Every structure is written in C-alpha cells, then in structure tokens.
Image: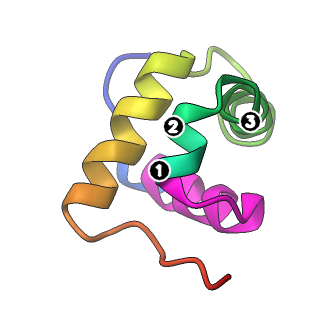
C-alpha cells in the first residue's frame, strides 16, 4: 500500500482520537505508535496495512497541516 486515501486518513484521525495520546507524545513512544499502527491496520486496512514509519509520517503531516484532531487533557 503506497499512498493514503481520503477514507484511510479519516479512519486514522478517528483512531488517533480514540487513542487519546497527543501526537508529540505518540511519535516519541514507539510502543504506543506500534499499538496504534496495529489497531489501524487490523480495523482499516486488513489486506496489507501501513508501516509504523508511514503511520508516523502521516500523523506528522496531518498535525503540521492542522488537520489532526486536538486532544483535551
């Protein structure tokens, strides 16, 4: 799987919000990022899925563009 599709991005934002860990913390915590990646791949892209690196890259891209949901803590 190469590029992110619109539906996958929306699913990622949903799973990120459910994860309830701010992106800066999530990107530094390899174990939590792996959990999110595994959960996302199992629920959204069971045929192939995304690597942890691609997941981190997409989260960072969404955060920088202001499209990642804000988490209240």
Q: Is residue 42 above or below residue 24?
A: above
**Image quadrant occupied by the C terminus:** bottom right
Q: Position of residue 20 (x, y in %)?
A: 72, 65
| For the residues bearing labels 1 and 2, Cβ distance under 8 angstroms | yes
Please report whichever mark, 3 or 2, sits nearer to the chain's N-terminal start: 2
Looking at the rendered structure, the number of numbered marks drawn on it comes to: 3
Is disc 1 surrounded by few (<14), some (14 to 19) or many (20+) residues within 10 Å? Answer: few
Please report whichever mark, 3 or 1, sits nearer to the chain's N-terminal start: 1
Q: Is residue 14 above or below residue 9?
A: below
Q: Residue 26: within the magenta?
A: no
Label placed on residue 72: none
Q: Which residues are magenta?
A: 8-23
Label placed on residue 24: 1
Q: CA distance from mark 1 to mark 2?
A: 5 Å
Label placed on residue 32: 3
Q: CA distance from mark 3 to mark 2?
A: 8 Å
Observer-nearest residue: 32 or 67? 32
At horizontal 65% and vertical 68% (from top left) the residue drawn is 17
The colour scheme applied to this rendered structure is: rainbow
Is disc 2 surrounded by few (<14), some (14 to 19) or many (20+) residues within 10 Å? Answer: many
Label 2: which secondary element:
helix
Q: Is residue 6 left or right of residue 44?
A: left
Q: Residue 22: within the magenta?
A: yes
* Residue that label 2 marks: 27
At horizontal 45% and vertical 18% (from top left) the residue drawn is 53
Q: Position of residue 49 (x, y in %)?
A: 61, 21
Q: Main secondary structure of the magenta part?
A: helix
**Image quadrant occupied by the N terminus:** top left
């Amino acid at each position: 799987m190469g590029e992110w599709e619109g539906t996958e991005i929306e699913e990622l934002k949903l799973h990120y919000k459910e994860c309830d860990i701010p992106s800066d913390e999530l990107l530094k915590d390899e174990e939590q990022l792996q959990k999110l990646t595994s959960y996302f791949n199992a629920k959204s892209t069971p045929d192939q899925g995304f690597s942890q690196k691609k997941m981190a890259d997409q989260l960072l891209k969404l955060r920088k563009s202001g499209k990642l949901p804000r988490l209240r803590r």
